Image: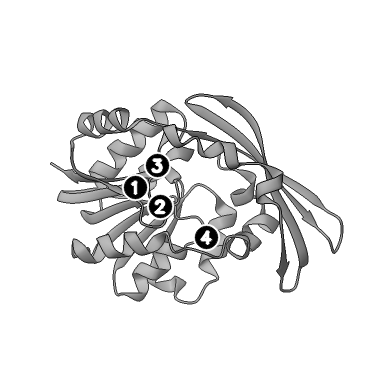
Amino acid sequence: MPDECFTHPRLAAIYDLLDPDRSDLDAYLGMAQEHEAHRVLDIGCGTGVFALLLAERGIEVTAVDPAQASIDVARTKPGAERVRWLCGNATSAPALRADLATMTANVAQAIVDPWSWHRTLHAAHDALRPGGRLVFETRIPARRAWQEWTRELSSSVTEVPGVGPVESWVDLTEVCLPLVSFRWTYVFAADGQVLTSDSTLRFRERGEVERDLLAHGFVVEEVRDAPDRPGREFVFLARRA
């Protein structure tokens, strides 16, 4: 099940405003251009930020996410009619013969169950044309990103138009590698409502990911550094053999 920050209508509606810096998507847009992608499958599209950026560039996009509330938000945005939106997981996507499949914003880590992870890779392979590419990021376990997931380091107050101030912060709840769990808390000052969203991420080592890709018919062409977070993430670029 997706996290409450994506499934709760009130949280999905403010998600983009609480995380407005999407410079992480620049590298993915660059790879779409680099590989001359005309048809893209965006797995775990969330509120549709990346899918809409692709569509603005004339790319045919199928965007899929298991959170209906996030899909509902995406469909209200300018240009949304250019994108094919699907509520579900990667296995919900039809045979697209896509040039590129993507999992941005650490979507790959949110797929914590091994069975679901392998099904996702299998579905991505099926959705791609021969020679099509899959690209995604995952945090480097050795960097121990979760050490920074504290209220002290994450607390902020965002003024949301039509909603008022929203305070948010994250607390680490459990580290049982390769799984790390945490909880976001949101306080709506206007009416005092407090909402929480519990999340768990899987921290995979580079070798594990490479073996999984190989097992599902991919050739790992390159493992890049994330330009917006140097030294903190692996960015995998794999080609359907």
Residue neighbourhood size for the residue with mark 3, other residues' Cα within 10 Å, grouped as few (<14), some (14–19), many (≥20): many
At label 3, the amino acid type is Thr
> Could you tell me which secondary element the residue under label 4 belongs to?
loop
Residue carrying label 3: 138
Q: Nearer the viewer, mark 2 or mark 3?
A: 3
Mark toward the start of the polypeptide (1 vs 4) = 4
Q: Is residue 164 visible?
A: yes
Label 2, label 1: how far apart the Cα atoms are: 6 Å
> Could you tell me which secondary element the residue under label 2 belongs to?
loop
Do labels 3 and 4 touch, CB within 8 Å? no
* Residue positioned 23% across, 55% down in the render: 98
> Could you tell me which secondary element the residue under label 3 belongs to?
strand
Label 3, label 1: how far apart the Cα atoms are: 7 Å
Q: Nearer the viewer, mark 4 or mark 2?
A: 2
Asked if residue 26 is positioned above or below residue 168 in the image, the reply reads below
Mark toward the start of the polypeptide (3 vs 4) = 4
Residue carrying label 2: 104
Residue carrying label 4: 47
Label 1, label 4: how far apart the Cα atoms are: 18 Å
Residue neighbourhood size for the residue with mark 4, other residues' Cα within 10 Å, grouped as few (<14), some (14–19), many (≥20): many
Do labels 3 and 1 touch, CB within 8 Å? yes
Do labels 1 and 4 touch, CB within 8 Å? no
At label 1, the amino acid type is Phe
Color encoding of the figure: one colour
Quadrant containing the N terminus in the rendered view: top right
Residue carrying label 1: 136
Asked if residue 72 is positioned above or below residue 103 in the image, the reply reads below
